[in-house]
Amino acid sequence: MSTKSPFDPYDSFKKYSEIWEKQINDFIFLLSNNNEFVKMSKVGTDSHSRYVEVLKKNQEALAGVLNIPTKNDLANVTSLTIQTEEKIDSLEEQIWCVQDSLNSQSKEIESVVEVSKEIIKLTKQLKTELVKTKKELADTKNLQSELQEIKFELNKLTILKEDIELLKSHVKNDHQKEPVLTGAGATI
């Protein structure tokens, strides 16, 4: 076995990149550490920013004349689209909540209808039973009045029986005692 590592082309590329990076960083440091360079870059940056501002204004003016949307217009439209999507999502959620509440209310209404049907059924049963009870009550009153009449008749019969018994006892007493004839030829 060999102790050498295999050739890696990326390893050499990495070394060269590190060397270039160090050299460029040193060059930038030397340039930026110089006051004259900083002043020159400031003047260049200021002039460039003024040029960019003028260019932006000219582009917006030209876009306005040609009726072409600008970057700001697109940003506004995008923000309005996002707001609209959020509002639509909110409305969808509210619609779902309303649908859920309607479903629950319809289920409650169905249960109330079922209970009402049961109540109506029970009411009809109670009504038929009330009619039967009234009829039975009328029959009971008729029976009671008939029983009163029978009781009255029984009382009369009892009194009559007592009178007959009394008469029987009188008749029996009268038969046991033989009548004694009193008269002209009788001896006592």
Image (cartoon, grey):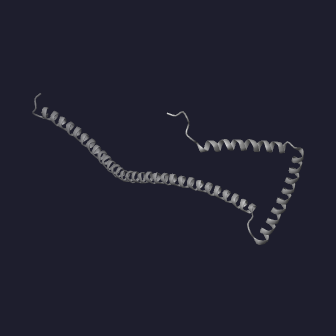
* Relative depth, front residue between 81 and 22: 22
Residue at the location (52% across, 53% down)? Answer: 105
* The C terminus sits in image quarter: top left
* Relative depth, front residue between 62 and 145: 62
Residue 16 appears in which quarter of the rendering? top right
Q: Is residue 141 left or right of residue 108?
A: left
Q: Residue furthest front?
A: 2
Residue at the location (84% across, 57% down)? Answer: 48
Residue 6 appears in which quarter of the rendering? top right
Q: Position of residue 4 (x, y in %)?
A: 55, 35
* Relative depth, front residue between 100 and 111: 100
Q: Position of residue 36 (x, y in %)?
A: 90, 47
Residue at the location (75% across, 61% down)? Answer: 72
Q: Position of residue 168 (x, y in %)?
A: 17, 37
Instruction: Count how many numbered circles sit on residues in the image.
Output: 0
Q: Residue furthest top?
A: 188
Q: Position of residue 98 (x, y in %)?
A: 57, 54
Residue 66 vertical position relative to residue 117 in the rendered view, above or below: below
Q: Is residue 122 left or right of residue 173?
A: right
Q: Residue furthest bottom?
A: 66
Residue 41 vertical position relative to residue 15 in the rendered view, above or below: below
